[in-house]
Image (tube, rainbow, N blue to C red):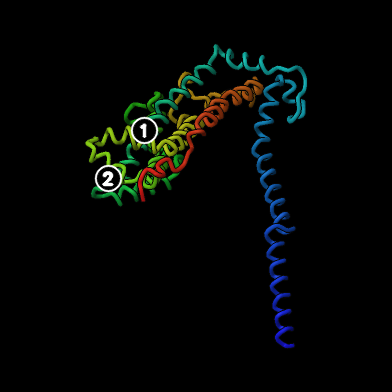
Amino acid sequence: MTVSVNTQSTRAIVTRAADRASRRRGGAPRSRSSFILTLAMGLMIVYSLLPLVWLLISSTKTQEELITSFGLWFSGPFAFFDNIVATLTYNDGIFVQWFANTVLYVVVGAGGATILATLGGYGLAKFAFPGKRAIFAVILGAIAVPGTALAVPTFLMFSEMGLTNTIWAVIIPSLISPFGLYLIWVYAADSIPTEILEAARVDGAGELRTFLTISVRMLVPGIVTVALFAVVATWNNYFLPLIMLSDPALFPLTIGLQQWNAQGVGSGADPIFNLVITGSLLTIAPIIAAFLFLQRYWQSDLGAGGVKQ
C-alpha cells in the first residue's frame, strides 16, 4: 500500500513538472515574452524610420509650408520635383559640384581604404613574421583613438606640407582604416583555411595568384562590410573637411548643406530649408542604394566544405 501511494505521488509530481515545462515552452509566459520583444522591436523600427518619413514628407513642401504645417503630414502644393530642380540649380548648380566631390572622396578614399585593409589584414592573418603582436597592439590602439582627436594634429601636419584646402587633405586621411584592417584580419583568419592555401602552393600557384583567385573570393563578405563602413564614414565625413577646406568648390555634401542651412540664421537671413531638406534626401539616397545592392554579398561560410575534416 505504501509503495502504491509513493508511486502515485511520484507520478503526480512528474506530471505537474511536465505541465509546467510545457507551459514554459509553449504557454502564456513565452507568448507574453514574444509579445514584449515584438513590441520593443516595433518601437525601434518606428524610431529608426520616423526621421526618414519626416524627411521624405518635408521634401514635398515649399519653404512656407515647411515652416507653418505639421511635419509628419503633407500640406500645400506637391513641390517635390520643383525642390529637386531648385536644389540642383541653386547658386549655379553648386550642389552638383558638392555631390561630385563627395563621390571622388568616396571612390578614392574609401576604395583605397578597403584595398589597403584587405591586403594588410590578409597578410597579418596568413603570414608569420617578427613583430606581429606589436602590430596587433598598435592597431587596437588606433581603433580606440577617436577620429576627432586626430583632426587637429592632422591639420597641422598637412598645413606644414602645404596640402590644406586640397582634395588630398580629405582623401589621404580616409585611406587609413584601422577597424577595417582589424576586421579583415579576424575574418581572413577564420574564413580562409590554411590547407587550401597550401594546396594552391603545392600546385605551383604564387602568392599573388592565390590571393586573387582564391582568397579574395572567400573574403568577399568581409571586403563588402569594410567597404560599406568606409563608404558611410567618408560620405558622412564632416569634421575633417570642415577644418581642412575653405574653398566652396571643394566642399563635400556635408559641409555644403551645412552652409546652406546657416543661411537661415542671423541678420539678413535667406532661409532655404526646403532645399536643405531635399538635398539631404538626395544625399542619403546613394547610401541606401549601395546598402541594398551590396547586402547580397553578405554570405557566410563561403569556404565551408572546401577542406575535408
Q: Residue at x 73, y 75 (%)?
A: 12
What residue did someone put label 2 on?
127
- Asked whether 301 or 237 is in front, the reply is 301
Q: In the picture, residue 6 is in which quadrant?
A: bottom right
Q: Residue 115: which disc?
A: 1
Q: Is residue 224 toward the left or the right of residue 32 in the image?
A: left
Assign a secondary structure to mark 1: helix
Q: Which residue is depicted at the point 53% across and 24% down? A: 256
The amino acid beneath tag 1 is: Ile
Amino acid found under the numbered disc labelled 2: Phe
Report whether 76 appears left or right of 267.
right
Image-quadrant location for residue 73: top right
Q: Earlier in the sequence, mark 2 or mark 1?
A: 1
Report the mark closest to the observer, 2 or 1: 2
Residue in view at x 53 percent, y 31 percent? 291
Quarter the N terminus occupies: bottom right
Along the line of sight, the residue nearer the viewer: 78 or 173: 78
Please tell me how crowded label 1 is: few (under 14), some (14-19), or many (20+) other residues with Cα within 10 Å.
Answer: some
Give x and y (percent) for residue 285: 57, 26
SS label for mark 2? loop
Any part of residue 173 in sight: no
Q: Position of residue 119 (x, y in %)?
A: 33, 37
Q: Nearer the viewer, residue 165 or 51?
A: 51
Q: Identify the mark at residue 151; answer none if there is no mark.
A: none
